[in-house]
Image (tube, rainbow, N blue to C red):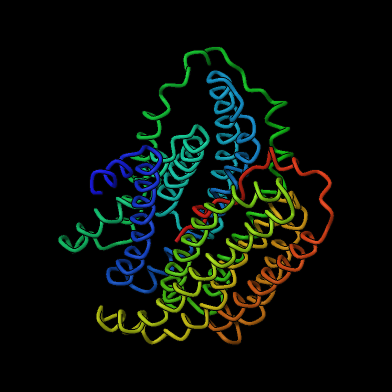
Amino acid sequence: MPARLLGFLKRPAVAGTGAAFILRGLTLASRFLLSLLLARMLSPAEMGEYGLLTAALAFAVLAIGLEFYSYTLRERVPATPAGRARIIADQITLGVIALLVIGVLVLAAILVDLFPSRLAPWFLLILITEHISLEATRILIITERPVRAYIGVFLRGGIWVYAMAVLMFTTPSTRALETVLVWWALGGTLAIAFSAISLSSLPWRELRGYRPDWNAIFAGLRTARPFMLTAAGALVISYVDRFVIDRFVGREALGIYTFYSTILIGLLSLGGSVSHQFLPKVISGYAASAQAYRVALRTFFWALLVLALGTTIISSLLMGPMLNILGLSLYASGIWVFYAMLPGIFLRMMADVPSYALYAARSDNYLLFCNLGAAFISTLFNVLLVPILGMYGAALTGAIASAVLFFSLAFLAWRKMREDRRDPGATATVSLPPDPDMLYP
């Protein structure tokens, strides 16, 4: 029996899945550790500044990538190695242009005193490393090297947190926001170096003299446009509250809110990682039959419900005692904000089920409409409620926007399931939904 079990564990598929699961778990754990570490080592005002920086980075990474991978994914899968190298070269060209535009915007923001000049170099460096390492991860997944992809994710978002924690505890002089940014950039650089080695087998020498295929780039932008708008809507729901709190309540209150938001976005990322495992089953079920489609969605729903309920209940029970043990009295004073934020995160996690149901059915317009609608409501209610209720207004707005998103998606998914499906093979070229790793702490 032990020999048979050992043989089973040594199977490449089993070992690869196990390694990916461990790496993913360590990466998610590092996000939780990071939030605790920042709360211990930084002042609430510095924590608030970190919250604004990460929110700006999330939008900037989207602006550089433009969700172009939703197009290149389809092109890379059937392409030859030389063709894949050319596609990557086109994507690099687009990224460089977008980065130059963002650089000009950051410079303009500094000149009008909307962005701190001392953080601008780190912002741009992290932006570059995050974008490149994120796209490299997607390429590794497409080229069927998932373990290497998750090693890159761990280097980009995990290992540097553990190293920085040791440094901050042993060297008090390093307890500053700049230290976090230095290590963050270092983690991204390590991920890029590892990905470059992993992708070195592609025929890069054949690109000598290659000129960008602008027709392909423009075609990709047209394909990626709805996915970019959908992802932008998701980011607005997650991050617009930080800017509004900073404007109407203050930087210290934003620091407290960012602490709790960082933890909850980690839970959302965990849910997104689980949802991605069900995506191929939902797509296959839709392509097979109405019954298979419903079975896949039913299994997905119950699995995600258990996860969402379990994580929200456990976090609500542990948060108070944990803050007391760590001596974070200032953050403990705002714990009811955390409790008020939980319903919104729960609904955001559960929204993956109807979202993926519509996604598998290629109802991209429905997804776009629901996400942009929820983003509009999030922005409007934050502006209306935060000046009156402070952080509680932002938490209430999160719940309202998430409820609108979930129930609108659920209604449209229910309608879609009742329709006659006349093109069962239509999902053969479907691309990926927004990546959960787009959501930064």
The one of 94 and 274 positioned closer to us in this rendering: 274
- Vertical position of residue 281 compared to residue 336: above or below: above
Q: Percent position (x, y) of residue 284?
A: 65, 46
The one of 255 and 369 positioned closer to us in this rendering: 369
Q: Residue at x 76, y 68 (%)?
A: 411
Q: Check the image and name the residue furthest to the left.
A: 170
Q: Residue at x 39, y 37 (%)?
A: 192
Residue 151 falls in which quadrant of the image? top left
- Vertical position of residue 237 compared to residue 124: above or below: below
Q: Please give left or right for residue 122 compared with residue 377 in the image.
A: left
Q: Percent position (x, y) of residue 307?
A: 48, 68
Q: Residue at x 76, y 58 (%)?
A: 366
Residue 42 falls in which quadrant of the image? bottom left
- Vertical position of residue 74 compared to residue 432: above or below: above
Q: Please give left or right for residue 217 compared with residue 113 in the image.
A: right
Q: Percent position (x, y) of residue 209?
A: 56, 12
Q: Percent position (x, y) of residue 294?
A: 68, 59
The one of 104 and 365 positioned closer to us in this rendering: 365
